[in-house]
């Protein structure tokens, strides 16, 4: 996968984890990650609880080691690399955060209609 695609993937993961953790957990702490992919460094600034940090680190590791040039969606991957428990937790986070993002975008559109 390209460096741009990798950066987009880790930023999306971070956004989803932050939404989920801020709404579901307490005791978040800030942490900055320096992540390397194809000899390029990326920075990621998080504010997560320890449980979410561990799962995010797991997801980033799996993403860094993805053998596919064109990364498939995990649920459609012919050779899934996630362990079953982590996969279930990731699906839960993605579902929850995706709904929140969808609802947030819809609410912003409605507000913009009424401001006009």
Image (tube, helix red, strand yellow):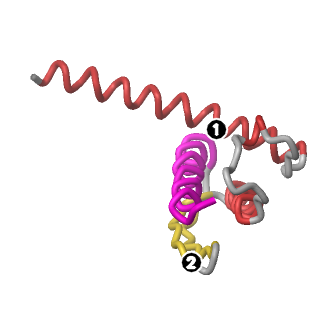
Residue 79, image x, y percentages: 88, 46
- Look at the image and say whether residue 10 sits in the magenta stretch: yes
- From the viewer's side, name the closer residue of 113 and 74: 74
Does 78 sit left or right of 105 as displayed?
A: right
- From the viewer's side, name the closer residue of 107 and 2: 2
Task: Give me the residue at 52% from left, 55% from top.
Answer: 8
Residue 52, image x, y percentages: 69, 54
Which mark, residue 51? none
Task: Give me the residue at 37% from left, 24% from top.
Answer: 106
For mark 2, does the 10 Å Cα neighbourhood hold few (<14), some (14 to 19), or many (20 or more) residues? few
Q: Which residue is mark 2?
A: 40
Q: Which residue is mark 1?
A: 94
| Upstream in sequence: badge 1 or badge 2 | 2
In the rendered structure, which segment of residues is drawn in magenta?
A: 1-25
Question: Above or below — where is 58 with respect to 37?
Answer: above
Task: Give me the residue at 75% from left, 55% from top.
Answer: 68
Name, please, the residue furthest toward the bottom.
39
- From the viewer's side, name the closer residue of 7 and 90: 7
Quadrant where the C terminus sits is top left
Residue 72, image x, y percentages: 71, 44
């Amino acid at each position: 996968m390209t460096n741009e695609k990798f950066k987009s993937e880790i930023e999306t993961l971070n956004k989803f984890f932050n939404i989920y953790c801020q709404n579901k957990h307490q005791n978040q702490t800030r942490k900055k990650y320096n992540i390397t992919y194809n000899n390029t460094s990326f920075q990621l600034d998080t504010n997560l609880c320890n449980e979410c940090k561990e799962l995010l680190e797991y997801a980033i590791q799996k993403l860094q080691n993805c053998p596919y040039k064109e990364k498939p969606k995990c649920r459609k991957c012919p050779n899934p690399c996630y362990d079953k428990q982590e996969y279930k937790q990731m699906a839960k986070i993605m579902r929850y955060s995706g709904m929140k993002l969808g609802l947030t975008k819809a609410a912003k559109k409605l507000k913009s209609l009424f401001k006009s």
